[in-house]
Amino acid sequence: MDSKIIVTEHARKRLKDFRQDKIMMADIMSAASSIPGRIPTATRFRGFFAKSGRMFDIVAKDIPSGRLVITIIGK
């Protein structure tokens, strides 16, 4: 996907939690841009891996200005 990836403040705050430890912003951007197609409603996508090896899920939705990452869920 060539459009802009927007990460909410909520998602940025979640990265500081222990459960999301070692998940970097680059991992989120990579995961969000790797999802094909259009996402009309907020949807949870499972099974992404950070470079550190940590598994995580993201909740994302497409909006007119790009792809919005609503939250991150570490495993």
Image (tube, grey):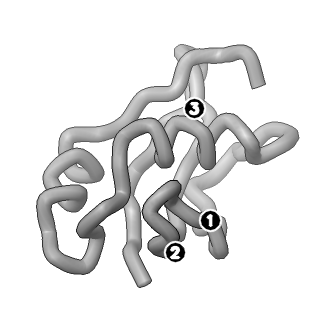
Q: Position of residue 57 (x, y in %)?
A: 53, 69
Given residues 75 and 5, the one toward you in this image is 75
Mark 3 and 1 residues: CB-CB less than 8 Å, in contact? Answer: no
Amino acid at dot 1: Phe
Instruction: Select label 3 or label 1 by which is in front.
Output: 1
Q: Residues within 10 Å of mark 3 (few under 14, many from 20)?
A: many
Query: Which residue position holds label 2?
Result: 55
The mark that comes first in sequence, 3 or 1, is 1
> Is 29 left, or right, of 13 in this rendering?
right
Task: Classify residue 49 by image quadrant.
Answer: bottom right
Which of labels 3 and 2 is toward the front?
Answer: 2
The C terminus lies in which quarter of the figure?
bottom left
Looking at the picture, tell me which residue is in the foreground, 54 or 60: 54
Residue at 51% over, 55% down: 51
List x then y, in percent, for residue 74. Answer: 38, 75
The residue closer to the viewer here, 74 or 58, is 74
| Contact between labelled residues 2 and 3, with CB atoms less than 8 Å apart | no
Identify which residue is drawn at 58% across, 45% down.
61
Q: Give the alpha-carbon distance from disc 3 to disc 2, as whole Å.
A: 21 Å
Q: Is residue 56 visible?
A: no
The residue singled out by tag 3 in the image is 67
3 lies above or below 37 = above
Q: Which residue is mark 1?
A: 48
Looking at the image, residue 63 sits to the left or right of residue 74; the answer is right
14 to the left or right of 29: left
Residue 16 position in % (x across, y down): 13, 59
Kind of residue sitting beneath label 2: Met
Q: Earlier in the sequence, mark 2 or mark 1?
A: 1
Amino acid at circle 3: Arg
Q: Kindly identify which numbered label has been placed on residue 3.
A: none
Left or right of 56 in this view: 21: left
CB of mark 2 within 8 Å of CB of mark 1?
yes
